[in-house]
Amino acid sequence: NCVVTLDNAPTGKPMIVDRIPEDDAELITYLSESGVLPGVEVVVSDVAPYRGVVTLQIGDETAVLGYGVSSEIRLRPV
């Protein structure tokens, strides 16, 4: 099982959230509201290093996460 960090995930390919950082309550709240939780299927639609953000599709919703956070979120193939 090939786990990758969100900032290194392939774009356009469905992935399952494997793990999120658990030591930052505000971040956990944001990720929960965005639907980025373990077991949820996401698709990385855009990785923009020059802007420092990663854009995710979760169903019909879009979430934009910073690179710092993205490097701590683990994804695995569906």
Image: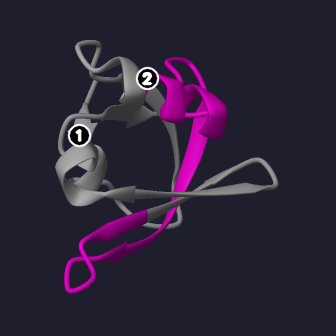
Relative vertical location of residue 47 with respect to residue 41 in this rendering, above or below: below
Q: Which mark is residue 43?
A: none
SS class, disc 2: helix
x, y (%) of residue 70?
27, 48
Identify the residue at image location x=56%, y=54%.
43
Looking at this view, name the residue that lies furthest to the bottom. Answer: 50
Labels 2 and 1: the sequence-earlier one: 1
Per the image, is 48 magenta?
yes
* Residue, disc 2: 28
Q: Which residues are magenta?
A: 28-54
Looking at the rendering, which quadrant does residue 52 occupy?
Answer: bottom left
- Outermost residue to the front: 26
Find the residue positioned furthest to the top.
22
Callout 1: SS: strand
Residue that badge 1 annotates:
4
Q: Which quadrant does the N terminus fall into?
A: top left
Q: Nearer the viewer, residue 1 or 31?
A: 31
Image x and y of residue 26, in percent: 40, 27
Asked whether, in this view, residue 73 is left or right of residue 43, the answer is left
For residue 29, above or below residue 4 = above
Q: Looking at the image, how many numbered discs can be counted on the residues?
A: 2
Q: Amino acid at mark 1?
A: Val
- Kindly identify the amino acid type of the residue bearing the numbered disc 2: Ile
Q: Quadrant of residue 3?
A: top left
